[in-house]
Image (cartoon, rainbow, N blue to C red):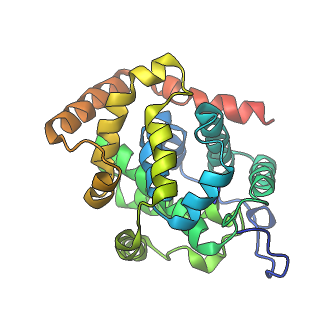
């Protein structure tokens, strides 16, 4: 989760995921959630988040996105895997850890930014899966939508804030995207991320392809605001290459990050 209101002591307590009985997820969902190829949508998700001014302000002032991008990615993945695939104890521990980290980040506990950040994770994950693996079945898509609510609710997003179903989610998404604006904070953080000066050389080598994929995933207005490439042929070529690489990679290899991060929290 990207950091996003300062601690509000008078907020009414919200039901936490650790207070509810865990939901048993299908094997199809577990395979989806454990597939590390979804991380390929991470940069697009971050740029979408930054287009929300409250999120951008909190990230610009408090985040380690640009200083330690790999560390930030690891913490985000650890949280997502713990919530969606971990034991109840891992889920609760991950929620407390991230909640504590957000305690002094402006905007991090406001429902609006929380909802938007959660929505970007859900949307880009499904986008990437469909680009690389094909269309999701309606049942699996419904389950992913329902499970995605836990990512926000574990950090005090009110239960009724999450759209009731995928149709409601689409309405929320379509109504929210036109309200986004890429301001100075967003541009500054995005410029650092896209320059990847703090990243290892191998990641910097992959940056042109990452920029092309991110341009494919972003709404056109935001792609232009971030000055990302508008090269449809290159974007399609990157998607084709990634599709081949992902399909030849054994599923066990693609699920290795999830297994390791969950094992590290046992």
Q: Position of residue 25 (x, y in %)?
A: 58, 53
Q: Residue at x 30, y 47 (%)?
A: 227
Give left or right: position of 125 versus 71: left
Q: Position of residue 237 (x, y in %)?
A: 20, 31
Foreground residue, 207 or 37?
207
- Residue 264 visible in image: yes
In this view, the residue farthest toward the top is 201
Q: Is residue 138 depicted above or below 77 in this figure?
A: below
Q: Quadrant of residue 3?
A: bottom right
Give left or right: position of 244 versus 112: left
In this view, the residue farthest toward the left is 233
Q: Residue at x 26, y 35 (%)?
A: 239
In this view, the residue farthest toward the front is 184
Foreground residue, 225 or 220?
225
Q: Residue at x 63, y 59 (%)?
A: 58
Q: Is residue 209 depicted above or below 32 in this figure?
A: above
Q: Position of residue 6 (x, y in %)?
A: 75, 68
Q: Residue at x 39, y 24 (%)?
A: 206
- The mark tally for this picture is 0
Foreground residue, 204 or 45?
204
Q: Position of residue 62 (x, y in %)?
A: 69, 51
- Residue 134 visible in image: no
Q: Is residue 27 depicted above or below 207 in this figure?
A: below
Give left or right: position of 166 versus 265: left
**In the rendered image, which quarter contains the C terminus?**
top right
């Amino acid at each position: 989760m990207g950091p996003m209101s300062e601690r509000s002591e008078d907020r009414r307590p919200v039901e936490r995921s650790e207070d509810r009985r865990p939901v048993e997820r299908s094997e199809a969902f577990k395979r989806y959630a454990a597939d590390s190829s979804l991380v390929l949508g991470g940069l697009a998700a971050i740029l979408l988040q930054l287009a929300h001014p409250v999120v951008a302000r909190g990230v610009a002032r408090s985040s380690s996105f640009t200083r330690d991008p790999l560390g930030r990615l690891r913490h985000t993945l650890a949280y997502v895997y713990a919530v969606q695939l971990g034991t109840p104890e891992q889920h609760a521990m991950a929620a407390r850890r991230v909640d504590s980290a957000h305690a002094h980040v402006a905007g991090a506990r406001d429902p609006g930014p929380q909802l938007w950040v959660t929505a970007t994770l859900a949307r880009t994950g499904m986008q990437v899966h469909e680009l690389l693996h094909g269309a999701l079945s309606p049942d699996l898509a419904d389950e992913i939508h329902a499970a995605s609510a836990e990512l926000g609710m574990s950090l005090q997003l009110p239960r009724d804030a999450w759209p009731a179903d995928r149709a409601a989610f689409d309405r929320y998404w379509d109504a929210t995207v036109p309200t986004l604006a890429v301001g100075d904070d967003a541009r500054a953080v995005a410029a650092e991320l896209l320059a990847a000066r703090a990243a290892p050389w191998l990641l910097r080598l992959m940056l042109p392809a990452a920029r092309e994929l991110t341009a494919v995933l972003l709404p056109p207005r935001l792609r232009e605001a971030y000055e990302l490439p508008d090269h449809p042929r290159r974007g399609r070529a990157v998607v084709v290459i990634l599709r081949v690489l992902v399909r030849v990679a054994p599923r066990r290899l693609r699920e290795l990050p999830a297994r390791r991060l969950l094992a590290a929290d046992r």
